[in-house]
Amino acid sequence: MPETAILWLRRDLRLADNAALHEAMTTCDRVLPLYIHAPEEESPWEPGGASRWWLHHSLASFDQSLREHGSRLAIALGPTLDTLLRVAGDTGATRILWNRLYDPATRKRDTHIKSALREKGFHCGSHNSLLLHEPWEIRTATGQPYRVYSAFWRKCAPGLTTPNTLDAPDRFAPAPEFQGIELTTLGLLPRKPWDQGLGERWQPGEAAALARARDFIAGGLAGYGERRDLPAVSGTSSLSPNLHFGEIGPRQVLALVAAECGPIDSAAAEPFLRELVWREFAYHLLYHFPATPEEPLDSRFARLSWRTENADALLTAWQFGRTGIPLVDAGMRELWATGWMHNRVRMVVASFLTKNLRLPWQTGARWFWDTLVDADLASNTLGWQWTAGCGADATPYFRVFNPVRQGERFDPEGAYVKHWCPELNGLPSKYVHQPWAAPASVLDAAGLTLGKHYPHPLVDLAVSRQEALAAFERIKTL
DNA sequence: TTTTGAGTTGTTCGA
DNA sequence: GTCGAACAACTCAAA
C-alpha cells in the first residue's frame, strides 16, 4: 500500500533545499503539493496588493516547474484545517508536511492544526526552510532573547559555516488524484492594472531567484559594503521578495557565498552576511515579542504624542510622494511604481514620517505592508520600530535623518531623485535635494515653479526636528 | 556578583 | 572645508 503525503506549501515555493518537500519525497510514494488560500487566517496582516501580485506569479512559476518535474501544484480554498482534512480523505494521505512560519497569527493557527491533525491520527511534520536558526535556538547567557543586534551577530557569526543544502529532486513523486481550483480564481492580481511597473521590475519564481542570487554574489558582493548605500546604483541584492516567499532560502544564499568567497568569514562577505543575520534577528524578535507589529517594544513610546492636526492630508502626501522633500518623494514614488524601495531611502522616508511629520510608525508600516513586494512582518516591524526609536537596538532618540543631508551624501548628483521626480531635472545638484533653497533665477532656468510643478516642503525640517526631539524628551522618564 | 564599556545605518554646533 | 563633542537610557557581555 503506497503511502501518500500532502506537502502543504505556504512561503516555501521552491524545489531546492526544501526540508518538508525532501521529507515527503523520501518517506512517501505519492505526494500532493498543495497551496491553500486562506488570507483571513493571517488577520490582521493579510497580504497586501503587491504581495498578492508576487504570490500569484510565484505560484504560477512553481506550478510550471512542478509540471516540468512530472507533477503539478494543487490549489484549494480554506479554511485550512477543513481543507486539509477533506483533501486527506479524498487522497488517502496519511502524512501532512510543511515548513514553519513565524508570524503570530500563523503560528497560532498552525499549532492548532497540528494538534487537531494528530488527534485524528495523521503524521504531521513541520520543518525549517525559512531561517538559518530557529528563533528559540538563540539565547543570551541568561536564557533571554536578544534585544541588541551586535550581540546577536556575535552569537550567530561563528555558525555561518558552509551549510548542507538539499538538492532539488530530479523527478517529483506522482501526485494522487485531486481536483483543485484554478490559480486565477484566487483573484490575486489587481482588477485595475496598476501592476505594470512590477512586471517590468521583477521576475518571481525559483529559477529567477537563484539566477539573481548567483548574479549578485558573483558580481556585486565585493562592492556591496560601499555601493549598498547608493540608491541610484543597483548595489543591493534585491533578494528580499524571493527570500520572503521562500523561492530561495538563506542556507542556499550562504552556500553560494561560501562557494564564491571560500572561507565564509572573509571580510568581503561580512557586510552582506550581516544583512542576512538582520533578517534572522527580525524573526527572533517577532517570535519572542509577538505584539510588536502593533505595539512598541519600548512601552514608553505608547505615550508618545503623535501629530493629530491635518494628519490625513500629511499621510496622503507622504504616501504618494508629494511632500516637497525630493529624496522622500523619490523613494515613495519608487515604492508605488515598483513595489520596492532602496533600503537607505526606506530609513529616510520612515524617519521623515515618524519624526518630521510625527505620524505613528504603525501607519507607515501598514502602507509598506500594502505596497512592498517584499512585505515581511518580521522585517517590516523591526525596520519601523528601529527607525521610530521604540524597538530593539534602540536607536538613539536624537537620530533624526535629515533628508537633504542624506541626499547630498548618498545621491550627490541627484540621479536617483531626478529619475523618480523628473520635474526636478533642470536643477543643479546643489539644489536638487532642497529646491526651496534655490534662488529664483535657478528655479526659472529649471522651468520649475514651486507649488505648481513640485510642492513646497510640507514641513520645515529644522523646526520639525526640534519638535520631534521635544516629544521624545517628554516620554523619556515617564 | 558587580562593574564597565560598547552599541548598523545621524545631525548640529562650535572650534 | 574638517573634527570632536554632545545629544538618553538600556541591553548585553566581558572583565
Image: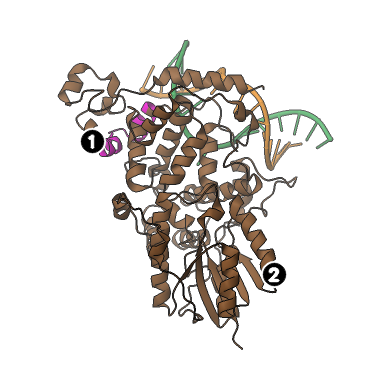
Chain colours: A brown, B green, C orange
Give residue A422's quadrant in the image: top left
Question: Is residue A348 within the magenta segment?
Answer: no
Front one among A189 and A98: A189
Front one among A396 and A308: A308
**Number of residues whose C-alpha sits closer than 10 Å to that of mark 1, classed few (under 14), some (14–19) or many (20 or more):** few
Give residue C11's quadrant in the image: top right
The residue under label 1 is which amino acid type?
Pro
Front one among A297 and A63: A63
The majority secondary structure of the magenta stretch comes to: helix
Residue A477 in sight from this viewpoint: yes
As helix, strand or loop, the secondary structure at mark 2 comes to: helix
- Residue A57: x and y in percent read 38, 61
Placement of A373 over or under A208, stated as above or below: above
Q: CA distance from mark 2 to mark 1?
A: 59 Å
Name the residue: 43% across, 23% down. A310
For discs 2 and 1, the disc positioned in front in the rendered view: 2
- Residue A24: x and y in percent read 57, 75
Q: Quadrant of the C terminus of chain A?
A: top right
Q: Which residue is mark 2?
A: A118
Circle 1 marks a residue in which chain?
A
Placement of A259 over or under A226, stated as above or below: below
The residue under label 2 is which amino acid type?
Arg
- Residue A159: x and y in percent read 61, 56
Mark 2 or mark 1: which comes first in sequence?
2
Q: Which residue is mark 1?
A: A422
Q: Which residues are magenta?
A: A404-421
Circle 2 marks a residue in which chain?
A
Question: Is residue A419 within the magenta segment?
Answer: yes
